[in-house]
């Protein structure tokens, strides 16, 4: 058993830094972050092909000063191997299940053939000892992630997740880029992961007592005065919404789930539900300093907004200053047209059944009884999300991006155009989305609070060829 920090260090050394998540300018010596993601060896020398081997297996990791926790890992790492690719690359993953139970891998947000999507609607569970080969070609630049799609509430919280960064030909010029995978774990006093779901965890989704950035508690992010920093963030937590703030630092949001957005905007707090990704730029303070990265309370229903402010990580600003200005970015996003498109009502609700069990429902049914949605390949549908519950639900659609048409009937401003695959549907509110369903197969849609998805808030969409 080695501590996670020394393990991470050893693996970074042994795999080189081809896929490290941070690329400082060559002449600058930067003390390595202890939060840099670990890459994986590309076994294919061809420039447009990435072949990797993944294994899901149990392991032990030590969080902070706690006793070692028993976890599940991809290749012994949490997060699993970080994959960096470019649009047009084909990723082939030879995956072997060494867990004591069946699993699959879902490639969250990536537009791919349905047979590669890792859901039980399209493939058999990968049994312990079995190998399955996933292979697909990246169509869109952006930050994506992968995780199991069987008992995901258990398997993801035990550590099975990883990030995939797909680059476009021209990316904004910045001084530093960091990929941050946000998670939390609930540790018992003896350091073991708590699997017990109390009533609150069943209701709200499990929230941990230990916040992790790239698998590390109390991570340190290093930059220098005036640096232009690009953060690529993904929230992989089961139930926690992150609401990030760096005091005195304005964040410029330039992208989200499906890549760059049409019109960047500035914000002091960045709210991210489970499954969502954000791409932000900021300029580091001009003077050397150390700043907390706070997670601010956010009211997502049932009085959850009374939580305390916590610190996710620290930003250490030191060294030679640089003077850059934030680059202008904008994406060409094709606006979906919905004239004549059919509407799909998706009502989200919760209730206690006669036995006192809390049910999470779509159109008044619990998965797998939620009536299937049918579409023809190439068809654009309008999804009418109606959250009839008192809490937010992050809605996720597999296989396709969607665009927001309206919120509570109010048309979305034209400038807010973005390709999303996961979005917060606030409690008691309505969201109207458009999606072009241009890939045949069976697809899932669900709440990305994993306890809700596994508790029934999940449906299937059949796209006929
Ligand atoms: Cu990230 Cu169906 O999930
Ligand atoms: Cu939910």
Image (cartoon, helix red, strand yellow):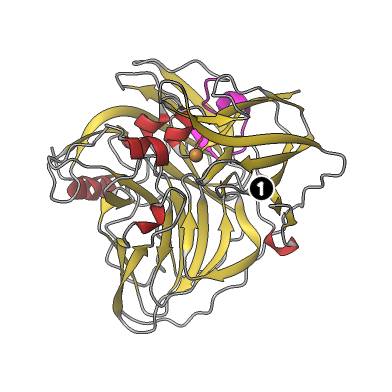
Percent x, y for residue 59? 23, 32
Q: Residue 246 falls in which quadrant of the image?
A: bottom left
State the SS at label 1.
Answer: strand
The residue lying toward the viewer, choosing from 404 and 427, is: 427
Instruction: Tell me where the magenta segment starts and ends, as one range.
Output: 106-120
Residue 301, horizontal then vertical, whole percent: 46, 49
State which quarter of the image contains the C terminus. Answer: top right
Image quarter (top left, top right, bottom left or bottom right) of the N terminus: top left
Q: Residue at x 41, y 38 (%)?
A: 203
Q: Is residue 92 visible?
A: no
Q: Is residue 163 above or below residue 354?
A: below
Compared to residue 190, the image places residue 367 above or below, namely: above
Q: Residue at x 73, y 57 (%)?
A: 410
Picture coordinates of residue 422, whole percent (x, y)? 56, 45
Question: Image point 35% across, 52% down: which residue?
Answer: 17
- Based on the displayed image, in which of its 4 quarters is residue 435 positioned? top right
């Amino acid at each position: 058993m080695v501590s996670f920090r020394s393990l991470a260090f050893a693996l970074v050394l042994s795999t080189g830094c081809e896929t490290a998540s941070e690329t400082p300018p060559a002449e600058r010596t930067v003390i390595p972050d202890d939060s840099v993601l670990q890459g994986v060896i590309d076994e294919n020398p061809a420039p447009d092909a990435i072949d990797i081997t993944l294994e899901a297996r149990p392991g032990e990791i030590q969080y902070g000063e706690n006793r070692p926790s028993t976890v599940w890992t991809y290749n012994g790492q949490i997060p699993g191997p970080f994959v960096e690719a470019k649009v047009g690359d084909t990723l082939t993953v030879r995956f072997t299940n060494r867990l004591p139970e069946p699993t699959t891998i879902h490639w969250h947000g990536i537009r791919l053939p349905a047979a590669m999507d890792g859901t039980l609607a399209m493939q058999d569970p990968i049994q312990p000892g079995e190998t399955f080969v996933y292979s697909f070609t990246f169509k869109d630049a952006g930050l994506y992630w992968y995780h199991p799609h069987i008992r995901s509430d258990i398997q993801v919280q035990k550590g099975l997740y990883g990030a995939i960064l797909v680059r476009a030909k021209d990316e904004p010029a910045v001084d530093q880029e960091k990929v941050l995978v946000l998670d939390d774990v609930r540790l018992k006093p003896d350091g073991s992961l708590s699997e017990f779901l109390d009533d609150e965890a069943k209701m709200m989704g499990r929230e941990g007592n230990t916040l992790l950035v790239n698998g590390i508690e109390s991570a340190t992010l290093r930059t220098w005065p005036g640096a232009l920093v690009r953060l690529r963030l993904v929230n992989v937590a089961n139930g926690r919404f992150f609401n990030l703030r760096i005091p005195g630092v304005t964040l410029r949001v330039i992208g989200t789930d499906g890549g760059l957005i049409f019109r960047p905007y500035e914000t002091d707090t960045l709210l991210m539900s489970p499954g969502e990704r954000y791409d932000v730029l900021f300029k580091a303070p001009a003077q050397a300093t150390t700043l907390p990265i706070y997670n601010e309370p956010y009211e997502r229903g049932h009085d959850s907004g009374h939580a305390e402010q916590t610190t996710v990580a620290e930003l250490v600003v030191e060294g030679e200053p640089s003077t850059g200005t934030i680059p202008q970015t904008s994406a060409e996003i094709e606006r979906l047209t919905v004239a004549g498109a059919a509407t799909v009502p998706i009502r989200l609700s919760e209730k206690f059944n006669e036995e006192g069990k809390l049910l999470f429902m779509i159109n008044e049914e619990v998965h797998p009884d939620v009536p299937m949605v049918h579409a023809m390949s190439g068809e654009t549908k309008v999804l009418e999300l109606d959250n009839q519950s008192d809490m937010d639900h992050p809605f996720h659609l597999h296989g396709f991006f969607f665009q927001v048409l309206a919120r509570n009937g109010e048309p979305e401003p034209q400038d807010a155009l973005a390709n999303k695959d996961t979005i917060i549907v606030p409690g008691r509110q309505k969201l109207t989305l458009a999606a072009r369903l241009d890939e045949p197969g069976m697809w899932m849609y669900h709440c990305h609070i994993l306890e809700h998805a596994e508790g029934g808030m999940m449906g299937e969409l059949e796209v006929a060829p």
